[in-house]
Image (cartoon, helix red, strand yellow):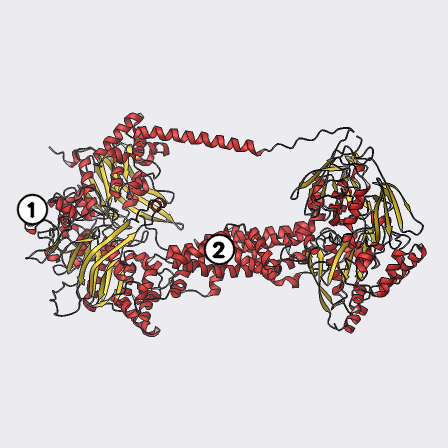
Amino acid sequence: MTTVPKTTNNARGVAPSLWRRLSLLLRKLYARPISAIGTTITLLFILAAILGPLIAPYGENEIIASEARQPPSPVHWFGTDNLGRDVFSRVILGAREILVLAGVGTLLAVVFGTIFGLLAGYSGGWLDEGIMRTFDSLLALPALLLALLLLGTVGQSQYSVLIVIVIVYIPIVARVVRSVVLAVKPQGFVEAARLTGESQPRILFREIMPFVYPTLSVESAVRFSYAIFLIGSLGFLRVGVQPPSPNWGLMVKEARPFASLVPWALFFPAAAISLVVIGVNLMADGLKRIMS
Amino acid sequence: MTLTRSEKRTILEINELTVAYQHAGEWLEAVRDVSLCIHGGETYGLVGESGSGKTTLALAVLRYLGKQGSIRNGEIHLGDLDLLALDDGELRQVWGSSISLVPQNPQSSLNPSLRVGDQLVETLRHQRSLSQQDAQTQALKWLEKVRLPDPGLVAERYPHQISGGMQQRVMIAMALCTEPKLLILDEPTTNLDVTTQVVILDLIGELIQGQETGVLYVTHNLAVVTQVCDRVAVLYASELVEDASTQDLFSKPLHPYTQGLIESIPRLGDTKGSIQLRAIAGQIPPIGDVPSGCVFRTRCPIAIDVCETRPPLYPAGDSRISRCHRWHEIDQMEVSARQPTRSRIAEHISPNGEQPQTLKVNDISVHFPLQRSLSDLVRRQPAKVVRAVNEVNFNVKPGKTLGLVGESGSGKTTIARTIMGLESKTSGSIELLDLPLPDKLSNRDLDTLRLLQMVSQNPEEALNPYLTIGDSLRRPLMRLSGLSKTQADSRVVELLQTVLLPPTYADRLPGQLSGGELQRVAIARAFAANPELLVLDEPVSSLDVSVQASILNLVNELQYEHENSLLFISHDLAIVAYLADLIAVIYLGSLMEISAPGDLLQPPHHPYTEALLSSIPLADPSRRGTPIHLEGDIPHPVDLPSGCPFHSRCPRLLGEICTTQIPPWQIDAESGKQIFCHIPLQELSTFQEHIVFGETSYPR
Amino acid sequence: MFTQYRRASKKRIFLFLVFFISLAFLIQACSGIPDTPTTPSAGMERQGVLRVAMQPIVQTDPAFISSDPEVIVANSIYDYLVDVTPQNTIAPRLAREWTVSEDGKTYVFTLVENATFHDGTLFKAEDVVWTFNRLRDPDVDSPTKDLYSNIENIEASDKFEVTFTLREPNPFFLYDISDNHALILKAESSEPGSDFIGTGPFKMVSYSPEDRLVVEANDDYFVADRPGLEKVEFIFFNDQTAQTEALRSGQVDLVMLLSADLFRTLEDEPGLIPLQVATNSFDVVRLRSDRPPGDDPRLMQALRLATDRQAIYDLVLQGYGAVGRDTPIGPMYSQYYSEDAQLPERDIPAARQLLANAGYPDGIDLELYTPDTGNRPNLAVVLKDQWAEAGINVDVIVEPESVYYGDDGWLTVDLGITGWGSRPYPQFYLNTMLTCDAIWNESHFCDSEFDQLASLAGTTMNEQERVDAYNHIQELLIERGPIMVPYFFSQLGAISDKFADFQMKPFPGRSDLSTVRLADQ
């Protein structure tokens, strides 16, 4: 076979610090236009989520009766809704709602999913079968349906939505991690580690995890976008969220009855959901390209 | 009357061809100024290691380089046809009809969803415009020609239903059925067993004989070249360094690289006690990064100032070329182009009285039950069992090397993995230093683990690509030897030096090392905690020829230093014979013969050993013997033949006794050889007396 | 020879293809289930199918119906003895005339003689007797059993004559006889909930709880020229916005019970006739007064002081109705409605002070429950904003109607918003919502003075006494009542202009569908 040279960059070969890795990652993400757009959108929304109350000119339920149902203007950038609330402020504050919940939920799902995936992939046998068959039955249900079923049992607070997100997305993460483990496990260095008497947890975390990280980071980004969409959908069904929460899905639902009179109250929250999901997905795409 | 070379028709002429690949914006030359000429009826060998450019050259002739590659310079003529001037349509007409290819891996070249016969018919109809009827008849005829048993049945089969050897025969049939002018073979036997390989090689030779077809045979295996080729071209780092008839090349190489290649491979009959293996110093330069002047300059034992200018292709006698400034001195034997070596000739150490055996393997059997299908369950049929290893017995003495030789499916790797605890045995016991060895890895304590280590075949997989070399080496030191981190660090430096790697490598990642370097690290890791027994499973099989020797020398040295025992596993009988103190031949899960290397070439031999020995291509073309062809394929370990496992292919089958009764172990009085056969040793000796294997054609 | 095999496998492939293609066609053909053929109309020429969009119904037994959809379905299949007109007057229906005794305790109804039930049986007095006995039977336990507890005796004084004898005089008895539940059933019906045997203008055709309920014209209806339609389909939608969309797209013809927002979007829509009628329908914000925190009257007063009813009316109702004064007696009852009592202006500092006095110096956290229909969710959110200024922090909890009106719902929560439909006379609210033993006393209010006044107003035949009593009650409720009524909303709806002669009543479920006919082109 033709030997194309191995990349001999990084002559030092020493693992770089976290900051350097992050900035390197950002640079790579911005190298291509499409992932640059996605990353920018995602970062903007994250910024909105963090700074929320600082940049929102009005409160989340600040009702100004005299300014109700006004179209976008210099005073109200996204206009006002039927009750006179500033749509722009609500969209910004909604970012915090949705992104924080989606972020924490995804993080937990990824952590637990990874643990399950590692165990299932490495142990094989009954443990593997048991875990994967259970997860298969969860995966058989569409996420929204599963979420509604679980929320019916668990109750409908924000915490239950968080739990539901975690449960809904653990199976996929576990499956992805497991497939990486299965690919890495038979390789020589894993056997060498076993022959050196390494304990199973050490092998999982030292030998196998480095292979999992690239796939996992892409999967996390994708799960994040799904979680956002799920929360939005649940909000639209007014499940797990109550007015006057600035959950974008709920905003869309509330704006529906007078969509023809006050269309901007429906458009902007809907656009927010679409935009952030697209942005995260484009970024995930870029990540995937970088990792492979 | 044989025509002289110049009178035969020229089939393929390559003139100063340069091919480059684009990588990261740069053009890297894979083939530089190569010229050669193939005549009708001639088999031309193209020899080189990885990075030599041989495959690129073959692809260039086919004009199948892909988007990354481009022909920068030169000409290729097929007869009168200028291949470089053809457009896509014309090329397609040339492919298959004027030029045929037999690729390395038949499995991936045959369409898995079409029956074998159909594929042949498809080729025939497309290339020769035959009717369906005629094409089918032709197809069957060709399947017969390539000596497939029951051609009609094979034609009905799908590719995955026939063995590798049979697949390759089908590929050969497909390549030759169109009666091309030029046949290109790209490592056609690399993936096949040695006993199958010999059959294929003979077949190719037979089919080409008397034809006007020109054959280009691309390979890295020098010995195979001697078996099949009339002429040889040697490529190194994208350049043609020597071109001569096979006879001339092997009797007297006129380039230091060729000489180095020839000398670095152990020949059948060479033992560590008789000669030194001379490895070529240094490494193959990466593509696009070759030294200026003579490409071999940095590794050449006789390089001088003039070598900094690029040598032209010197005519070096009757239809010979050499790209070495000092070829004439080599020819006149004024200078020796032998590589220096560090290895020493092993002294024979007499056994040291009553020491416990390092390893005792007692009647090991390893059987894998296959999963029963639903229909099997319903019909209450018992699960089929893969009998990978059957009642194998052997010992490894302290400080000694046991070589285990077998082909694919013989069970040798299973035995290694069972000893290491990576597989579970079905019956039998293993003792390490006279203490029973727990079956499962998890049941072995750290002290036991320290005593047993393994080096595997694939060095690329041996190290975790995310950990530095130092990290990988520290683990056994800290875990098995109980060293602290600081202690381990200094030991790591020592280890690297032992395997001739610079200490700075400790901070490198495996991706930055070559295959040979990686294997050295793997060996260093295995030796790190000073095990009693080191199992090496095909440690050099995936390495380049020139690197193999250095690894073998290294293993030898380390063993001498640490006085540990080795279990060396390989399919290559010559290498095993070189390195081992005792050789065990394994076939289909059972041992066939146990013999000392010095006695290996003398009769009596087990019939299987005999076939193995005869299938090893001799590097001396003048002594091409008639290899023994084993009929049929290696049976699958699920359908184990009764009685002697070898009876289905044994050319010296005695009779019914071989099919029904398990043979006894016979011990030859003179040599102490143990042979697992019904045939009385005396008889075997008589039959085998006149057969000569092994040669020493070159003064050592 | 491998040629034979080749031919065989080609044939096989062909056969499979034929099989699958035919299978595909078969499935295609079977999936189109043909429509049930329409019954040819006999007698009067009727035209038109009116499709009404509404929330799904739960109850079909007239004794237990409550929501507007349930009432309108029952009202088309059964008849009342007497009906209430859109102007809130009593009109004859199954009873063609009646007399009242001097002392107001005896009522004699003369029934029509040509009405038949849908199964052909003649309608007679015994059906009326059986129906009302059932309605007041404690074992049946209909919400009306208390309503009719005042009836001493019911008898069929003749084949087509029924006499009711009361214990106490009841000035509103005729309205009570026309209560939503008082639809006349056939005597001795075994399955009143699912028989669907009535005398009404329409007959049951089919009922699919997930989809729709279909009725067709009753050819033998005893009222001449009625009904004007051939069929009515009641199509179930869970979502009001979806109902509006369906109306707009022509999927349905009539939608009622709309919120102000939805109505606004339909007002200018071509092809639709907007429907609007002033009513006494209201949303009540009620606080349980029998347990903390509501048992301290200062809390309710604080809530009152923190509320700006005008702002709510403007924002939420957008002018479709009237501002409320925290009593269930609205301007529709022109003779009883009074603005004499002083309703306090919004006063945040005073509210804070009251809260502090009541023991909540840093404010109070409350949960406000509301069903998800109509204007109520918006009202909740506006209240949350208004009350926040006074330190009253409210968590809004919106629930589906079935949950809010179910167990542990509106009759149990501390703070909730409940919708009440319009009734012809205000006594109804007092008796069912606010007296100590009221059956729907969601605020668990119990005030002896209130009970006395309510009792007086409900029994005296002296109109002036009644007026004074109601005035007094309004004053009492503003001072110490457990409820806030921010507004009375008009009933809003829209109908396709293909239809004419539809009159929506203040309680929309009581609208009479038998008058509707196709508009003249």
The kind of secondary structure the magenta stretch mainly shows is loop
Disc 1 and disc 2 on one polypeptide chain: no
Pinpoint residue C476: horizontal percent, then vertical percent. 86, 63
Residue B357, picture quadrant:
bottom left
Q: Amino acid at mark 1?
A: Phe
As drawn, C475 above or below B145: below
Disc sitting over residue B603 in the figure: none
Q: Nearer the viewer, residue B295 or C416?
A: C416
Which x, y percent locates residue B327? 17, 50
Circle nearer the viewer, 1 or 2: 2
Give the chain letter at badge 2: A
The kind of secondary structure element at disc 1 is: helix
User: In the image shown, does A238 or B520 lie closer to the viewer?
Assistant: A238
Can residue C106 be found in the magenta stretch?
A: no
In this picture, which residue range is highlighted in magenta?
Answer: B288-292
* Residue beneath disc 1: B687
Task: Write down the quadrant of residue B66 in the picture.
Answer: top left
As for residue B290 lying within the magenta part, the answer is yes
Q: In which quadrant of the rendered view does residue A62 lie?
A: bottom right
Image location of residue A190, percent across then percent down: 34, 60
Residue C409 point in image, percent of width and height: 70, 58
Nearest the camera: A180 or C378? Answer: C378
Q: Is residue C347 left or right of residue B493?
A: right
Q: Is residue A285 visible?
A: no
Separation of residues labelled 1 and 2 (CA atoms) = 67 Å
| Residue sitting nearer the eye, B331 or C438 | C438
Q: Amino acid at mark 2?
A: Pro
Q: Which residue is mark 2?
A: A171
Residue A122 appears in the rendering = yes
Subunit under mark 1? B
